[in-house]
Each structure stands twice: as C-alpha cells, then as structure tokens.
Image (cartoon, rainbow, N blue to C red):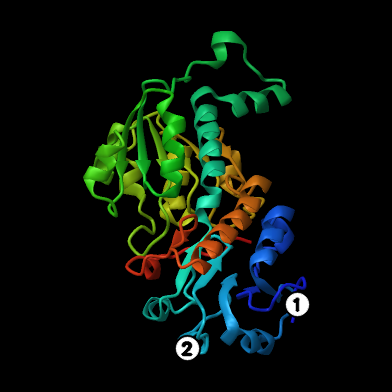
C-alpha cells in the first residue's frame, strides 16, 4: 500500500495523490522526509485505479491532492481531517458543504505562490514604467533609441497613484514591495471591510474610483461568479490615458476583447501574465502590440514556490495531527469557496 519506513503503524495515514503536480516537484527532500516521519504515506501518485483510493480512504486523516470527493465518498472517510489541494485552485469536484459538516479542512496552496507573483508583478510594473523589454526588442531589430529619445513615455513608480484590484494573498505579498516607492495605494476588494484596508495604510475605494485615480493598476482578484469580466469595456475606459495595467491573477477577470481594442488604440500600456487561451494562438493580434509586455503564466510557478507547497503541507498536517488548526495554507471559507470560477492550470 505504499507504506514507508519501519516505524509503528500507529502513525496517521495520509494519501498522496497530488495530480496534476508531481511529488518530486512540490516536496524537497527535507519536507518529504518530514512527511514520512510523521505519517504513514500511502503513495497513489501513479495509481489510476479508483478502488485503491477507496480502499485506503476510510483510514486516511488527510489527502494531499484534490481527487473527486462527492458527499458519498466523504461519508466513508470517517477519520478524514484535511484535504490539501496542491494544484492552486478550489474546484467544484469536492463537496465543500459536506466537508464543513464533517469538520474536514480544505486547504489551498495559494500562499506558496504569493511572494513569487508579487516580485514578478513589480518587475512587470517597472518594465511598463520604463519600456525595458520594448527597447530590448527594438535593439534586436536595429531600431533602438538612446538617452532621452527612448524615454518620452517613461514614468516613476515613486510617489505614484497605485490601484490594487483585490487584496488577498497576492495583494498582501505585493504591498511591502510597493511601499518602498512611497506611493498612494487605493484598493477595491468587496470581501474586506474598509477598516482592514485602512489599518494597512491603504485607501479603500469603489472599482470606478480605484481605476480612475490610478496610474498603475494591479489586477490581483480571483475569479468568482461576481468578478468574471469585472474589467469590461466601461471599466477599462476609466483608466487614465497612459496608465499601466498589470494582470497577474486570472484571465477571466478581464474582457480580453475590450482590452485588445484599448491597447490597439494606444490608450494605456499593459503587462499580462494570464491568458484566456494558453498557449496563445500564433496569429493572436496581441502579438502585434508594442504597448504590451507578455508573460506566459510564469509569475508564480518557480521552483522555490513549488517546494514551498510541500513545506506548507507538512506544517499544517502536523498542526492538525496535534489537535491544532492549520496556519500555513489557505483555508477554504465555506461562504466563498463555491463562488470561485477558476480553471485548471495546465
């Protein structure tokens, strides 16, 4: 059954089925050893037979992965305390209401990616401010400009008006990086009270207020039933001429047809890391835009972020085994989890 080591079998059973991740990607040697030291790990990573999973499920205290878990399956998992989703999204293949009823934590690995996404976001914003990749492209075609000739549209981050659309894991990781530039930061996040934002030195605002007042706008919101195409034509038209838009959360938050038309008209500049279709088609008109910085869904998926997932999993499973609540991963809030509309990252 994939048991490891020769320790007493009183160790709690953990099912390891991390698809679409691989164990070697998300667990460094130290965290994998720590997992196996504390738990009897039943490794089903390469086992496609659902009967094997169901045989082990009644003994498992935790599942690392997010296989299909309808109510009838969960009711057979008498000892289950946690489901550790290591893909990065909460999907509708789990009966979250039953998990809440049974006291099963559903945990997401989003916090593992936050620092990597924050640093990449800052890099994209600086690129948009100073035309770094644009002038590099020009150099490779022999059309580069020197000194002031290439700086006509350059702007500073320092003292800038910055808007954050969403203030979850990504916003909290990005905030200290931005504070070094002494900006004015406005935030739209309907899931947070204004007082929470003000305590962070931020100015809460409506979506329209944040868009209209900002030179740099970071789109950090997840996709929910309410936020799909949150930034449509009318909202994008509120952006200041020459402003900079950084999209690093989910593509579905933005209407890409409206974004294309505004970029093609030269209304503002944008850096985009998430796309409605990945890879983008070879004939995509976005490829012809000089005021666009392309990033191929690279913001969070770096080795340091992947191995961080394993560290968070081990910490929280040890917490739960000790009768304590998880503190490292993101707990799926029963009021919110069914509203997410994220799609798998391939």
Q: Is residue 2 left or right of residue 236?
A: right
Q: Is residue 274 visible?
A: no
Q: In the rendering, at what x and y percent does residue 122 appear?
A: 51, 33
In the image, taking residue 119 as reference, residue 103 lies left or right, namely left
Q: Is residue 206 above or below residue 244?
A: below
Quadrant of the image occupied by residue 213: top left
Q: In x, y percent, where is residue 80?
A: 51, 79
Can residue 320 be seen here? The reply is yes
Quarter of the rendering occupied by the C terminus: bottom right
Dot 2: what SS?
A: loop
Label 1: few (<14), some or many (≥20) within 10 Å? few
Which one is earlier in the sequence, the residue at label 1 or at label 2? 1
Nearest the viewer among 53 and 235 is: 53
For the point 46% across and 51% down, the residue is: 256
Toward the viewer: 328 or 18? 328
Q: From what the image shows, is residue 328 above or below residue 262?
A: below
Q: Which residue is mark 1?
A: 2
Query: Tag on residue 193?
Result: none
Query: Quarter of the image holding residue 218?
Result: top left
Give the image location of residue 133, x and y in percent: 62, 29
Q: Give the camera-side residue of 293 and 55.
A: 55
In the rendered image, which residue does mark 2 sit on?
75
Q: Residues within 10 Å of mark 2 (few under 14, many from 20)?
A: some
Give me the C-alpha separation between circle 1 and circle 2.
24 Å
């Amino acid at each position: 059954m994939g048991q490891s080591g020769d320790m007493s079998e009183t160790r709690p059973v953990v099912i390891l089925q991390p698809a679409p991740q691989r164990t070697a990607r998300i667990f460094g040697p130290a965290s994998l050893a720590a997992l196996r030291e504390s738990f009897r790990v039943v490794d089903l990573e390469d086992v496609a037979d659902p009967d094997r999973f169901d045989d082990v499920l009644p003994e498992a205290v935790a599942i690392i992965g997010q296989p299909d878990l309808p109510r009838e399956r969960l009711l057979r998992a008498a000892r289950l305390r946690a489901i550790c989703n290591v893909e990065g999204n909460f999907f509708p293949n789990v009966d979250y209401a039953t998990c809440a009823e049974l006291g099963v934590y559903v945990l997401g690995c989003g916090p593992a990616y936050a620092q990597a996404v924050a640093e990449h976001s800052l890099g994209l914003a600086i690129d948009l401010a100073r035309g770094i990749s644009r002038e590099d492209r020009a150099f490779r075609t022999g059309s580069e400009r020197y000194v002031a000739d290439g700086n006509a549209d350059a702007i500073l981050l320092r003292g800038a008006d910055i808007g954050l659309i969403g203030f979850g894991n990504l916003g909290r990781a990005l905030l200290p990086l931005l504070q070094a530039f002494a900006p004015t930061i406005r935030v739209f996040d309907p899931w947070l009270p204004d007082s929470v934002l003000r305590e962070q030195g931020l100015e809460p605002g409506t979506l329209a207020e944040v868009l209209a007042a900002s030179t740099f706008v970071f789109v950090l919101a997840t996709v929910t039933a309410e936020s799909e195409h949150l930034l449509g034509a009318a909202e994008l038209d509120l952006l200041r001429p020459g402003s900079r838009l950084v999209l690093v959360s989910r593509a579905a938050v933005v209407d890409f047809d409206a974004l294309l038309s505004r970029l093609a008209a030269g209304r503002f500049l944008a850096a985009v890391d998430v796309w409605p279709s990945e890879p983008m088609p070879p004939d995509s008109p976005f490829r012809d835009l000089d005021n666009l910085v392309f990033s191929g869904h690279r913001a969070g998926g770096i080795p340091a972020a992947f191995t961080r997932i394993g560290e968070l999993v081990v910490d929280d499973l040890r917490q739960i085994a000790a009768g304590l609540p998880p503190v490292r991963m993101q707990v799926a809030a029963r009021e919110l989890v069914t509203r997410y509309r994220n799609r798998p990252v391939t």
